[in-house]
Amino acid sequence: MSSADAFEIHIHDVIHRAINVISPDDAAQTDAMSFWVYADQDDPRRQVADFNYNTTSNAKSSEDDAADADEATWN
């Protein structure tokens, strides 16, 4: 197996585990998912991948603090 194949399998496994943490109730009302990859402390050797999601109920409860419904969904 090449290192590229091993990396692809690793990323797949990490994403799979992250998505499987979502409760069934949240999964049923998930509006948005995001993956953000960045270098921790601007060090390219320390890559971090953050996975986030938002639900319909969370977006609705955030609408008063957002510019509009779209911002509440994505932020």
Image (spheres, rainbow, N blue to C red):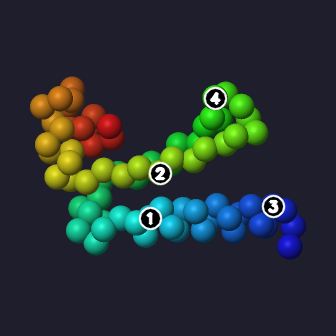
Measured Cα–Cα span from mark 1 to mark 2: 8 Å
- Please give left or right for residue 58 compared with residue 3 in the image: left
First in sequence: mark 1 vs mark 2 = 1
What residue sits 64% from the left and 61% below the top? 11
Measured Cα–Cα span from mark 1 to mark 3: 23 Å
Location of mark 2 (residue) = 51
Q: Say which element carries label 2.
A: strand
First in sequence: mark 1 vs mark 3 = 3
Quadrant where the N terminus lies?
bottom right
**Rendered image: mark on residue 19:** 1
Question: Mark 2 and mark 4 in contact (Cβ < 8 Å)?
Answer: no
Residue 22's quadrant in the figure? bottom left
Please tell me how crowded label 2 is: few (under 14), some (14-19), or many (20+) other residues with Cα within 10 Å.
Answer: some
Please tell me how crowded label 4 is: few (under 14), some (14-19), or many (20+) other residues with Cα within 10 Å.
Answer: few
- Please give left or right for residue 54 compared with residue 14 in the image: left
Location of mark 4 (residue) = 41
Q: Say which element carries label 4.
A: helix
What residue sits 61% from the left and 66% below the top? 12
Location of mark 3 (residue) = 4
Residue 58 point in image, percent of width and height? 20, 48
Question: Mark 3 and mark 1 in contact (Cβ < 8 Å)?
Answer: no
Please tell me how crowded label 3 is: few (under 14), some (14-19), or many (20+) other residues with Cα within 10 Å.
Answer: few
Residue 41 point in image, percent of width and height? 64, 29
